[in-house]
Amino acid sequence: MGSSRSHVLVEQTSDPRQSVTGEIRAFAKCRNERLRLPAFLTHYRALGVDRFFIVDNDSSDGTTEYLAGQPDVRVFRTTNLFSESSAGSLWLNPLLSRFGVGAWCVTVDIDELLVYPGSEQASLRDLAKYFDRTGREALSCLLLDLYPAGPLAESRYSPGDDLFAAAPYFDAGPYEQSPVETCPGVFITGGMRERVFYPKFRARGAGAKACDALLNTAAYHFPILGDTPWIRARWRRRPPLLTKVPLVRWDATSMYMNSSHWVSPKIVAPETGALLHFKFLHDFHRRAVQEAARGQYYDDAIEYQRYAEQLNQNPDMTLMGEQSTRFERTSQLVGLGLMQDTDAWVHARHRNIA
């Protein structure tokens, strides 16, 4: 590794435990995430992750040093541009290929905490054993934005604090799901970011929705069309994609496309989970301005430009709305239809607990 194609500089640290037998392994990319890292590691250790493989993209806030001091973390560094990494896939796929084949792998961002039906009691190892018995290879998830009750500028969070106490609210709906051919087969949008930052998209009529669907289908089947001036002039800016596939039994043919939104064909479980997304803390305004200026995300960071513009106009913005709901437990998300449970998984996890 370390080739120009992989974009990853691998730290040459000793690691005598190379066997993946029975391990749950986590993979992530990050840049300047010192604030969220303690809560991230605590959450995934509690779920049963055995080891972490994290790509640090030229952090300057102590992230690299903090990770290097964690006994169950291997740090890999790159100074390459994120805009040239296929949303991090060129960094993570080589790591997964080298260290993940044969294991159940969790691939997430540092601000994403995985939950699934019954995850308060059932570990990732319990879930992985259940999937192995039932022939499943992947868990599909909704990326669910969590946010504080008051203005972002007034929220407070320190490293190691409880993220759920700092940002306990989420939008119970609406969310739209449409079928796509790429695994896991569903395109999800909606939630708080659509409501707050893309209100015109939410308010569009039936004709506009039909036009958008046609343009999206054409661009999906013929990607080169997406870069033509005629299509771009008519393509409505849509809210962020909320589909993710963070848990996969990795094999030699596995590959992520566009971060962990899409994965190579897998047998996807009927159960689904959620990635609780803690992007919206007191540092969000500053980070939005920085990322808009860096221009490293999709389409010259057009999404971050939108965030920065609205927050610059209204620094005391609150994200609360009529659909805001306080997070309580995974059964709440199942009841709202945001996660899917099954009788088989209920029986399996209760048997393990008993």
Image (cartoon, rainbow, N blue to C red):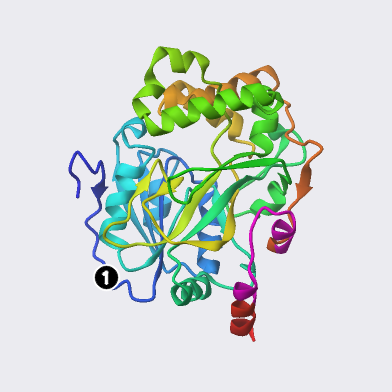
Q: Which residues are magenta?
A: 331-346
* x, y percent for residue 151: 74, 33
Residue 242 visible in the snapshot: yes
Q: Secondary structure at mark 1?
A: loop
Residue at the spot of label 1: 18
**Is 287 on the left or on the right of 12, as rendered?**
right
Instruction: Give the residue at x 46% y 45%.
Output: 261
Locate residue 95: give its quadrant.
Answer: bottom left
Which residue appears at 50% of the width and 70% of the height?
48
The answer to whether residue 339 is above or below residue 205 is below
Horizontal and vertical percent position of residue 16: 25, 72
Choose between 292 and 139: the one closer to the eye. Answer: 139
Foreground: 20 or 268? 268
Q: Is residue 272 left or right of residue 95?
A: right
Q: Is residue 317 above or below residue 78?
A: above
Direction from residue 35 to residue 205 in the image, left or right: right
- Please indicate, yes or no, whether residue 110 appears anywhere in the rendered image: no
**Residue at image coords 67%, 39%:** 191
Q: Is residue 317 left or right of residue 51?
A: right
Q: How many marks?
A: 1
> Is 177 in the magenta?
no
As for residue 336 lying within the magenta part, the answer is yes
Residue 229 is situated, as x and y percent measured from the top left of the image, at 41, 12
Kind of residue sitting beneath label 1: Gln
